[in-house]
Every structure is written in C-alpha cells, then in structure tokens.
C-alpha cells in the first residue's frame, strides 16, 4: 500500500507540473519537460541509493507523470510530417545522450 501511495503522490506532482508548464501546442516546452523527466529518472536511478519508496515515487511516479510520450505520439501522428518524425527521434536521441552523460563511469 505504501508503494502505491508513493507512485500516486509522485504521479500527481509530475502531472501537475507538466500541466502548469506546457501550454497546448508548445512543442519546445513539451520537449523540455520530456527531457527533464528522463533526467529525473536517470539521476535517481544512477545516483541515488536512498529508500525504495523515494525511488518509486520519483521514477514511475513523478517522472512518469511529468513525461508525455503518449501526448507526443498523438500530436505528431496527427501532423504526419517530416518535422514530426524528426522531433520524435530527436527527443529519443537527446534522452539517450542525456542518460549516457549522467551515468556513472566504471573502471574496467
């Protein structure tokens, strides 16, 4: 029950932040919010070793509520343009590069 509550609280906060920051049709803000969600999840996953409840509240809860993959997919599928395809794949590429840059390095 504690885990469900942690995800719910994080999800509410992330969803509210997304709603308050992204105006309808603002593709740049939508892009920024998605990258911010990826960074939050990445920093928590790679850098924090704190409580499981905090990790659950922040990764699937807050970051999941903050990011808007379904919105991006629907909005850009409606446009059916090369710009939409480039936007989508650029967001994925920036997300992967961002995670690579914050991941701790290990010595081989």
Image (tube, helix red, strand yellow):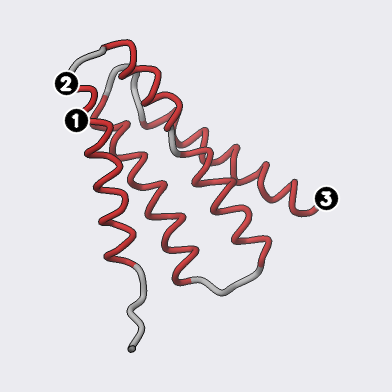
Residue sitting at x 16%, y 21%: 82
Residue sitting at x 46%, y 55%: 41
Label 1 with label 2: CB-CB less than 8 Å: yes
Indicate left or right for 56 with 79 as reference.
right
Q: Picture coordinates of residue 12 (x, y %)?
A: 60, 37
Which quarter of the image is occupied by the C terminus?
A: bottom left
Which type of secondary structure does the marked residue at label 2 adopt? Answer: helix
Q: Residues within 10 Å of mark 3 (few under 14, many from 20)?
A: few
Which type of secondary structure does the marked residue at label 3 adopt? Answer: loop
Q: Which residue is mark 2?
A: 82
Q: Which residue is mark 1?
A: 86
Q: Residues within 10 Å of mark 1 (few under 14, many from 20)?
A: few
Mark 2 vs mark 3: which is more N-terminal? 3
Give residue 29's quadrant in the image.
Answer: top left
Up the image or down, 7 lies above or below 16; here it is below
Foreground pick, 16 / 50 = 50
Q: Give the alpha-carbon distance from disc 1 to disc 3, as whole Å.
A: 41 Å
Residue sitting at x 42%, y 24%: 71
Give residue 50's quadrant in the image.
Answer: bottom right
Which type of secondary structure does the marked residue at label 1 adopt? Answer: helix
Q: Give the alpha-carbon distance from disc 2 to disc 3, as whole Å.
A: 45 Å
Nearest-to-viewer mark from 1 and 3: 1
Foreground pick, 103 / 22 = 103
Mark 1 vs mark 3: which is more N-terminal? 3
Q: Picture coordinates of residue 98 (x, y %)?
A: 28, 57
Foreground pick, 50 / 88 = 88
Q: Picture coordinates of residue 92 (x, y %)?
A: 30, 42
Instruction: Report how many numbered discs are placed on residues in the image.
Output: 3
Label 1 with label 3: CB-CB less than 8 Å: no
Q: Which residue is mark 3?
A: 1
């Amino acid at each position: 029950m504690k885990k469900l509550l942690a995800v719910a609280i994080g999800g509410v906060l992330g969803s509210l932040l997304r709603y308050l920051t992204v105006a309808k049709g603002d593709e740049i803000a939508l892009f920024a919010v998605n990258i911010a969600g990826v960074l939050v999840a990445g920093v928590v996953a790679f850098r924090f070793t704190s409580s499981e409840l905090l990790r659950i509240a922040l990764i699937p809860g807050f970051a999941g509520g903050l990011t808007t993959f379904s919105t991006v997919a629907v909005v850009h599928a409606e446009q059916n343009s090369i710009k939409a395809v480039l936007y989508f794949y650029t967001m994925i590429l920036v997300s992967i590069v961002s995670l690579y840059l914050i991941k701790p390095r290990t010595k081989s």
